[in-house]
Amino acid sequence: MKFYVVEEDRSAGFTGNLRALPPWGFPGVTPCDACGAAGGWAGLQYPCVDLSGLQEREALENPGRQVSVEEFSRLRDLVRPFVPSWARLEPGADFGPPTGTGSGTFGDLFMQNPWSLYIRREALERLQDAGIHGLSGCPMNVRFRGKNPPELLAMQLELHGRLHIGGVPPEMRRVCPNCGMQRHELPQPPILDVHSMHEPPELFRLHDWPTFIVASERMADSVRRLPLTGVRFNELAAR
């Protein structure tokens, strides 16, 4: 089976833009005393997670700040009961539906950036009718300018699979015993380790590189056949 990285189709001419942010998010972390890692991750987005019932949710309403590793661990323990079992909870993760405004024209699928994917409700239904199941999209709190605004859903994607890291120096592969971080540059070329996955869904994020949104061959073929607009597929080497 082939796999593809999902990318924005800039040749399609759509002008859509979202000025919307999730209501909650983990702060970044201050530099680790052991390894020096700091900041947060991009691509860990859980728009279907509702934290309105969390008593200390105000601590997650200013994700731009930085906290100690110990404080982050405390916040992560508070959030864990509200998220799916497969969720990866790291500094910088976002929760809840994007909230704000939108303008312009949108394709059937839309990427605000390389790691944020949205889909029109009717496009999701067409994919489901075509036999593509397991896709999860949640309504957003976004006000659109103009008539006939699109009904866009924010996609919540499971995490599956890893990249081969044979070219990464051994010292960069180690997990810090203090903060749990493992940071290394994107392996070049990126190659999907097919043995790191067990029955992945048709659309998912890479577990170790969540900014990569990956589609199965079946998903890519369905989008092309229907046809649905807004994205293109770049084959990801796999072995």
Image (spheres, grey):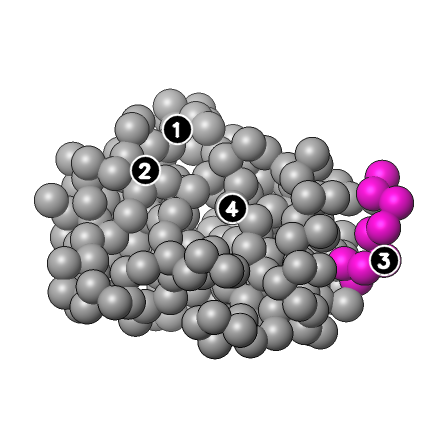
Three-letter amino acid code at disc 2? Met
Determine the CA span between mark 1 and mark 4. Answer: 24 Å
Horizontal and vertical percent position of residue 25:
69, 58
In the displayed structure, does residue 155 sit left or right of residue 134? right
Q: Which residue is mark 3?
A: 58
Q: Is residue 146 at least partly visible in the picture?
A: no
For label 3, the crowd category at 10 Å Cα-Cα, with few meaning under 14, some 14 to 19 and many 20 or more, is: few
Q: Nearer the viewer, mark 1 or mark 4?
A: 4
Q: At which x and y percent is residue 160?
A: 36, 40
Residue shown at the point (71%, 51%) measured from the top left: 74
The residue carrying mark 2 is 219
| Outermost residue to the right | 55
How many numbered discs?
4
**Which residue is at a point 28% across and 35% down the rendered structure image?**
197
Q: Which residue is mark 4?
A: 88
**At numbered mark 1, what does the secondary structure look like: helix, strand or loop?**
loop
Q: Which residues are magenta?
A: 53-61
